[in-house]
């Protein structure tokens, strides 16, 4: 999935997100496992608010996204903050991740990995992230939970207003696969221009996610609620998972 026209309104539609709290949590998780600097990849960086915060905190950040529109918004933000040249931006599919060397950490937030499916493709994305991760490296990522798909998104529609556009968001839940099909209709206020985008989200049992992480050399250090960062509850809508790379592929062989 790659946002196209929606990229230019993403920040307005996502303005309720508490980036400060998310950044503080991630920085604490990284530091608690010894990663306070070095190369960090933001996988599915989007418009890059978290990417910029991590760069300002001293990490050498690589921002990776499929959407050129998202990366374009991020470039403008980086220019405004004087961070041009300090962040490497790559347009890549996470299933085909190809970095220039190893990384000390990776983060992925706002449901990037929930957009990857079905399960064999999700596993491939985990494998790709693991391949470039140094031993002792930290991977912090979030996922929408099956509960959210079944009880919050299923069959629901949302109307969201931005300064320049209106967005009508429709969800259709397929119980057999745990998939939500999403349609977005965007209408510009001033011109009446209309755009449509469609994509899917997948939810996976936590046991399956853990199995894939273990398969590619990670141990799971912590799973927290992805919104308040406290203990996971039965009605948690998002998990945030901290995984540590225990061995390289060469050591496994």
Image (cartoon, helix red, strand yellow):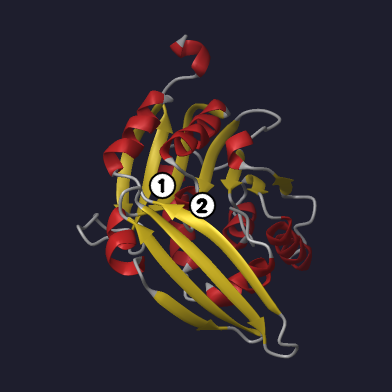
Q: Which sits in the foreground, 48 or 38?
A: 48
Task: Kindly report which numbered mark, 2 or 1, lies closer to the viewer in this rendering.
Answer: 2
Whether residue 15 can be seen here: no
Q: Is residue 63 above or below residue 157?
A: above
Q: Position of residue 93 (x, y in %)?
A: 63, 42
Q: Residue at x 37, y 73 (%)?
A: 156
| Residue 82 % position (x, y) | 77, 62
x, y percentage for residue 141?
45, 47
Residue 146 higher or lower than 105, as above or below: below
Query: Element at badge 2?
Result: helix
Q: Quadrant of residue 227?
A: bottom left
Q: Say few, some or many: other residues with alpha carbon within 10 Å of mark 2 (under 14 / 14 to 19 / 20 or more).
A: many
- Secondary structure, mark 1, is helix
Res. 208 visible in picture: yes
Residue drawn at (71%, 30%), measured in percent from left and top?
100
Q: Which residue is mark 1?
A: 29
Q: Which residue is mark 2?
A: 112
């Amino acid at each position: 999935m790659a946002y196209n026209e929606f990229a230019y309104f993403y920040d307005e539609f996502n303005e309720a997100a508490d980036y400060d709290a998310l950044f503080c949590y991630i920085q604490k998780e990284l530091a608690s496992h010894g990663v306070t600097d070095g190369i960090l990849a933001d996988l599915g960086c989007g418009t890059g608010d978290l990417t910029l915060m991590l760069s300002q905190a001293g990490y050498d950040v690589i921002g990776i996204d499929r959407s050129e529109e998202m990366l374009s918004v991020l470039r403008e933000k980086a220019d405004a903050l004087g961070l041009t040249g300090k962040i490497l931006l790559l347009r890549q599919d996470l299933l085909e991740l190809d970095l220039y060397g190893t990384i000390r950490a990776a983060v992925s937030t706002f449901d990037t990995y929930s957009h990857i499916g079905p399960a064999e493709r999700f596993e491939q994305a985990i494998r790709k992230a693991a391949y470039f991760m140094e031993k002792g490296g930290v991977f912090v990522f979030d996922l929408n939970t099956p509960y959210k798909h079944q009880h919050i998104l299923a069959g629901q529609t949302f109307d969201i207003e931005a300064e320049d556009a209106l967005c009508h968001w429709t969800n259709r839940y397929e119980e057999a696969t745990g998939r939500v099909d999403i349609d977005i209709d965007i209408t510009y206020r001033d011109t009446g221009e209309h755009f449509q985008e469609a994509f899917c989200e997948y939810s996976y049992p936590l046991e399956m996610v853990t199995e894939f992480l273990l398969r590619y050399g990670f141990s799971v250090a912590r799973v927290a609620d992805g919104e308040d960062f406290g203990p996971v509850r039965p009605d948690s809508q998002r998990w945030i998972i901290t995984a540590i790379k225990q061995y390289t592929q060469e050591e496994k062989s």
